[in-house]
Image: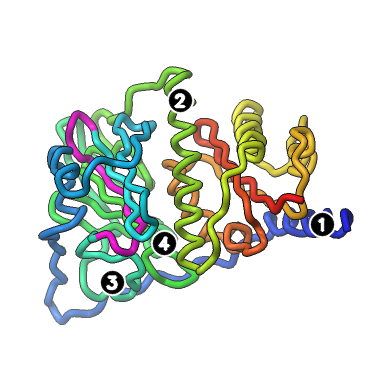
Amino acid sequence: MKWFFLFLFLLIGFYYFVPSPPPQSPPEQPKTNGYTLKEPKATAGVAVLIGRPAQEAEKQFGAPDRIDPSAYGYDWWVYSRRPESYFQIGVLGGKIVTALVGGEKVNVEPFAIGQRLQTIFQTMPVLSNIKITLNSGTYRFELSEQDYSSRPVVKVGEAYAQLYIDRFTGRVAAVRLMDAETFVKLRPYELVYRGRLPAATPLSEKEQRQVDAANAKQIFDWTNLIRRRHELPPLVWDSKAAMAAAKHSQDMHDHQFFSHESPQYGDLSKRLGALGVSFQLAGENIAAHQVDGVEATVGWLNSQKHREIMLNAEFTHLGVGVYADYYTQNFLTPL
C-alpha cells in the first residue's frame, strides 16, 4: 500500500511539468456600426468605494474579520466569515485604494462573480492598452493576447477593474478593483512609462515575514473558496505542511531556482518526511513573481495540472508557505 501511494505521488509530480493547453483566443468586441460601447458605471457595491474613506466600508459591512498587511503599503481588510460573501478591501492612509472580490453574493457591479466573459465583451469596452497620467509621470500598459483573454481590464469611473477569468469555464473567477496609482504600483502588465515609477516603501525583514504570512492565509482562503464553487469540501490547515511549504519557498528564493526538486532538500516526499509528515497522497503547486498570493492562486486555477491538484477531491489538508514573491502549496491526505 505504501508503494501505491508513492506511485500516486510521483504521478502527480510528473503532471507539473506537462504544459497546459494554450489559452483560448479572446472574444472580439462586437461590431457596432459606429456606435461605441459605453464605459460602465457603478451606483452601488464595492466598486463605488474605491477612493472613499475606509469608514464607509465599515459602516456598510461592519468591522473586518482580520486585517492583513500587503507588500504595497495598503492593509487588507478581509471579510471572510462566509465564503459566498468573501472580499478584501485595501486601505492606505484611511482611504480605500483597492479591493478583491471572490464571493458570488458580493455586489461588484457592473460585474458579477460567475459572469461570462463573452457577456462583458458584448456590453462594455475592454481595454488592450491603458494610459494613466499621474503627477509622477505617464504610464502605458499593454496587454498580451493571453492577458486580454484571462485578465482583461475595464475602466469603471475613476477605478480600474481587473477581471480574473477562469479560462476553463470562460467565467469571472475574481475581480480586482484599483485606483490609478495602485494600478501603476502593482504593475500587472507590460509597462512603458515616462517620469518616476511609484513604488511601495521597502519592507523590513519583520514586515516582509508578516506580509508572507498574510499571503499564505489568503491563498488558503481563496483555495477553499474555489473548491466550494466546484462543490468540493474545504481543506483543513496543516501546520507541518505549511512549514515545509515555507521552507521550499525560501529555498527557491535564496538559491534562485524554480522547481519541485530542491538541490539540497529533495522532492516533496523527502521534504515532508524530514518534518515527520506521513501521508497517503501529497501534491504541490509552486509559483513565483506574482503580484500577490491571490493572483498566484488564480494562476494555478488556469493551469490544467495545477488546477487538477487544487480541485482534487482526495486531498483533505493544505499547508501554504510564502517567502517574498515565491509561493508554495502543499496538499495532503494524511495516513
Marks 2/3: CA–CA distance? 39 Å
User: Which element is circle 1 on?
Assistant: helix
- Left or right: residue 312 compared with residue 274: left
Q: Would you name the residue on which mark 3 appears?
A: 121
How many angstroms separate mark 2 from mark 1 (CA)? 37 Å
Q: In which quarter of the image is the N terminus?
A: bottom right
Residue closer to the observer: 187 or 61: 61
Q: Is residue 254 left or right of residue 174?
A: right
Q: Which of marks 3 and 4 is nearer the N terminus?
A: 3
Q: In the drawing, what numbered circle is on residue 247?
A: none
For residue 210, above or below residue 91: above
Identify the residue under disc 4. 150
Q: Can residue 282 be seen in this view?
A: yes
Q: Name the residue under label 1.
A: 5
For residue 244, what is the image quadrant? top right
Region rendered in magenta: 92-106
In magenta stretch: residue 93 = yes
Q: Which of marks 1 and 3 is nearer the N terminus?
A: 1
**Element carrying mark 2:** helix
- Are dots 2 and 1 in contact, CB under 8 Å? no
Q: Please say which color scheme the image uses.
A: rainbow
Q: Name the residue under label 2.
A: 208
Classed neighbour count for the residue bearing mark 4: other residues with Cα under 10 Å, few (<14), some (14–19), many (≥20): many
Instruction: Specify few, some or many for label 3: CA neighbours under 10 Å numbering under 14, 14-19, or 20 or more.
Output: some
- Sequence-earlier tag: 2 or 1: 1
- Identify whether 259 is placed above or below 111: above
Frontmost of labels 2 and 1 is 1
**Residue at image location 27% in from the left, 70% down from the top:** 120
What SS does tag 4 mark? helix
* Mark 1 closeness class: few <14, some 14–19, many ≥20 residues within 10 Å: some
Q: Where is residue 200 in the image (x, y as percent from the top left)?
A: 32, 28
Mark 3, secondary structure of its residue: helix
